[in-house]
Image (cartoon, rainbow, N blue to C red):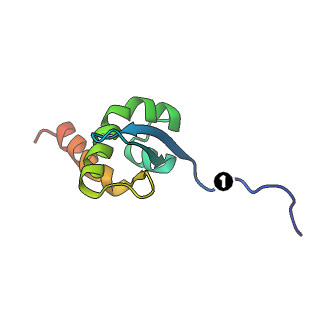
Amino acid sequence: MKKNGASAPKELGLFWPMLTAEGTTINVFIYASTLQFFDSDPLGPVGLLKRHRPLLESIASEKYDREGATADLLHITEGDLQPMRANEAMAADPE
């Protein structure tokens, strides 16, 4: 049986513009599932983006300085967030 209409997106991507030190605007994006991997609060992806935007912008800036951007697009991945998640775990367990 064939279904008509557009298929539902498999993943929600959240985008925002970031100005680089060179004065170029690039688009930074992160998948909703990556944000939920980092913070499992049921706030929702947009709420999580608002909550963590300063941290995400810092990560994006460091990644841009290291790697640059492809076609003015920079993707933040789970791998980019893992050091931050490890730091939070260490801060929560002071022993």
User: Going by the picture, which residue comes out furthest to the left?
Assistant: 95
Q: Residue furthest front?
A: 23
Can residue 88 be seen here? The reply is yes
Say which quarter of the image contains residue 10: bottom right
Q: Quadrant of residue 41?
A: top left
Label count reads 1
**Can you see residue 44?**
no
The residue sitting at 50% across, 42% down in the picture is 15
Quarter containing the C terminus: top left
Give coordinates of residue 39: x percent, y percent: 39, 41
Please identify the quadrant where the N terminus is shown: bottom right
Q: Residue at x 29, y 58 (%)?
A: 67
Q: Residue at x 28, y 46 (%)?
A: 85
Please give left or right for residue 20 compared with residue 70 in the image. Answer: left
**Please, is residue 21 above or below residue 50 in the view?**
below
Residue 5 lies left or right of residue 32; in this view the side is: right
Q: Position of residue 45 (x, y in %)?
A: 51, 38
Q: Which residue is mark 1?
A: 9
Give x and y (percent) for residue 12: 57, 48
Indicate the amino acid at tag 1. Pro
